[in-house]
Amino acid sequence: MVEEKVGEIWRHVLDVPADMKDATFFDLEGESISAIRLVSRIEEELGVSIEVGELFEEDPNLEALIQKVVAEAKISATV
């Protein structure tokens, strides 16, 4: 399931503490290398492309990132 896989990638790349489940990318001290790792693994494991810049512009939490990936997956499936 896409949601579970994105959550697994997010937690692994950003090393999310248990008490920060709703934290945003920047709350978790996300930076360029972690953004690249996130989008690379999402593309590699789910076949969904998102832009690295979106992480910096939108500063998503996990739920927002899941919504973005799901939306992109639907767009990709219709093309």
Image (cartoon, rainbow, N blue to C red):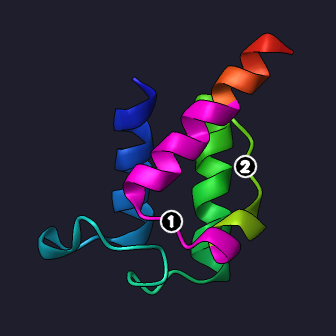
Q: Which residue is drawn at 34% across and 35% down?
A: 4
Q: Residue at x 13, y 69 (%)?
A: 18
Query: As drawn, which residue projects farthest toward the top?
Result: 78
Q: Position of residue 6 (x, y in %)?
A: 44, 43
Residue 49 in which image quadrant: top right
Q: Is residue 63 magenta?
A: yes
Magenta-tinted stretch: 56-72
Q: Is 20 situated left or right of 6 in this image?
A: left
Between 6 and 61, the one lying in front of the other is 61
Mark 1: amino acid? Pro
Residue 48 in which image quadrant: top right
For the C terminus, the quadrant is top right
Q: Is 50 situated left or right of 22 in this image?
A: right
Q: Where is residue 13 in the image (x, y as percent from the top left)?
A: 45, 64
Q: Is mark 2 on a helix, strand or loop?
A: loop
- Alpha-carbon distance for marks 1 and 2? 13 Å
The residue that label 2 is drawn on is: 50
The residue that label 1 is drawn on is: 60
Q: Is 13 situated left or right of 40 in this image?
A: left
Q: Residue at x 79, y 12 (%)?
A: 78
Above or below, comparing residue 76 to residue 36 in the picture: above
Q: Is 57 situated left or right of 45 in this image?
A: right
Is most of the magenta stretch helix, strand or loop? Answer: helix
